Image (spheres, helix red, strand yellow):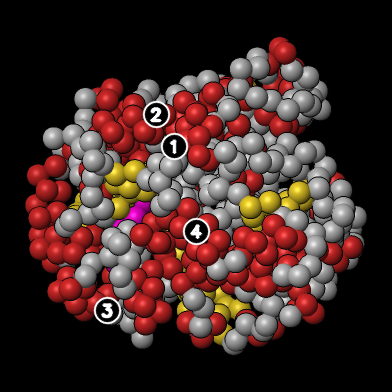
Amino acid sequence: MPTLYDKIWADHLIGEREDGQSLLYIDLQLLHEVTSPQAFAGLAQAGRMLWRRQANLATPDHNVPTENRAAGIDGIADSVAREQVVALDDNCRQHGVRQFDMLDPRQGIVHVMGPEQGATLPGMTIVCGDSHTSTHGAFGALAQGVGTSEVEHVMATQCLAQSKARNMAVQINGNLPAGVYAKDLALALIGRIGTAGATGHTIEYQGEAVRALSMEGRMTLCNLSIEAGARAGLVAVDDTTLEYLEDRPLAPSGSEWQAALAHWQELVSDSDAEFDSAASLDAAALMPQVTWGTSPEMVAGIEEVTPNPNQAADPTEADGIERALAYMGLAAEQPIADIRLDRIFIGSCTNARLEDLRVAASIVSGRRVASNIKQALVVPGSGLVKQAAEAEGLADIFTAAGFEWRAPGCSMCLAMNPDKLLPGEHCASTSNRNFEGRQGHGGRTHLVSPAMAAAAAVAGRFVDVRQWL
Amino acid sequence: MKAFRRETGLAAPLDRANVDTDQIIPKQFLKSIKRTGFGDNLFDAWRFLDEGDIGLTPNERRLNHRFVLNQPRYQEAGVLLARRNFGCGSSREHAVWALLEYGFFAVVAPSFADIFFENCFKNGLLPIRLDEALVDDLFGRAQGDGGLELTIDLEAQRIELPDGGELAFEVPSSARRKLLDGLDDIGLTLAQADRIRAFETSYHQRRPWLKRGVGASEAAAP
């Protein structure tokens, strides 16, 4: 009666350390330039080596510029950011770690690149010094975001020392209506259970709406697990998973593929598996979601209004609502569809895969970005997504509509690179966090699906994309 | 890592829920390749009215006098009192480095986000979970006249209040041991290196497709 999480945990459990922590064997560590330099430095300081260099895969993503990419590292105007990318290069060379560097077409956001290359496989344990590592759970892999000390720990020992999380089942029944996507599912769930709703848990997403999602959709859903507080998110392996993986460059082939299949097909929770907690959602009843505040749980449907702090459950919540409305420049009970926008960002590890760009392009095709929009950016998740989107004409659709078509990276999701909001600007963003200042000092972020961001670009304010299909 | 046994300090009340790590240390300061230099930019967007960047020192900045940590009475605070779900969001360990460097040795809140909670113990910052009603009471005292000085005894898992009162707390036993002895986490695991190696060998026999890994850089080290 084990759950999927129990099975992966047991498969990687080495045993207990003397202090009682469990040692969990880690199959893959993804590295990027922001959270790895201190870990590499720590290794050097202690005179330690990588335990297993072929278990590490690196690419720069967080602060790479999305323009002038042909110039490579020399194209990074910010000398401090450049130093980080140079450090990643040096560290990878020195330790023999494989890296897709800034000039490599496979470079991209770690959580887009890993699955795309087939580096992410079912049943694996994966870590990365980035909280959105939960993305890889879409493949039935236990993927956890960790801090830099743990990055160094995995580099040196190939293990995580941790205690087991609890199991949470999220059941999503029904079929998603047209114009409503995995992003809306995830935001609605976070709105329901809160950003601490799954703290201490590994979520397994179940139900017909999850089974019906493509791998891209499942990645979006698992990506946002961390915004519900979860340690990790999981989706059980099925034919959709296997079809995606077959023939990926780093996926097994031939007899190894056959051997792997036999194992992967066991990667589902037993029918009588017991979960410590549960939540459910009816996909069929959902409408497009828009965040109005400064936490992903501050979300409403497109036909709804912002909340009134007077109706909050307790003073702490009321204070949070009031503060968020003030920061966002919104009134209580203001219709979501009244929110006017200044910038549009289509990108990030949440929503910058080919499927996301296809949906957005289908909305903007033959239309123009509204005159009040100062900038509309499309930042593909990887160089390969960019190439594919260009080959099928999506880039032309975006540029004809007035979008800027950029090179891959995290970009305006966290605005470590030059792409950012100015104080007071409202942005419809397909990213994952609407925290104060996240996309730029004083910037106001509204999280939405790619379709909603595309429609908002054309209308200049939020509109119900279901009416545009 | 420095050992943590018993520390005394003033409590500063940060009265808002869901404080995320983007607020604790904003992204522009993550470009550093070091573990130090973050204390000046703790809660940067709340402590200062102007936008901060690497290289600007606090005395070149416009202070937000309304922010709690800027009030003269909380200048020497060592304990941060916070509300529920403290440290949510990004996994950046820089948030913990910034809190420590600023001068905090403990954070007391009703709940913490998982990754932040783990990161604290790796660096000697003590996250203490207390019931919401107890935290409420501490807020009241810290905001009152004279402030609130707390002594935190990790060995006894006890907070000592100025009026002689005591509050019991619990931290995971493995983390507590590590903090008390200032142990090197990696060293602790490497003491099991033979066991890890044996596991790895049998694991790769069971899962042969994972043995090869993702390859190595062309300029691979020997």
Q: Quadrant of the N terminus of chain A?
A: bottom left
Please give the count of numbered marks on the rendered protein.
Answer: 4
Residue highlighted by disc 4: A387
Q: Residue at x 61, y 65 (%)?
A: A394
Sort mark 2 into few (<14), some (14-19) or many (20+) by Cα contacts within 10 Å.
Answer: many
**Badges 3 and 1: C-beta atoms under 8 Å apart?**
no
Which residue ends up furthest to the top in the rendered image? Answer: B59
Q: Amino acid at mark 1?
A: Glu
Residue highlighted by disc 2: A87
| Horizontal side, residue B204 vs residue A440: left or right | left
Give the residues drawn in magenta, as a range: A123-127
Q: Residue at x 18, y 73 (%)?
A: A254
Q: Quadrant of the C terminus of chain A?
A: bottom right
Which element is circle 4 on? helix
Q: Amino acid at mark 4?
A: Gln
User: Which chain letter matches label 4?
Assistant: A
Whole-percent x, y for residue B153 in the image: 45, 30
**Distance (Cα) linking label 2 and label 3:** 41 Å
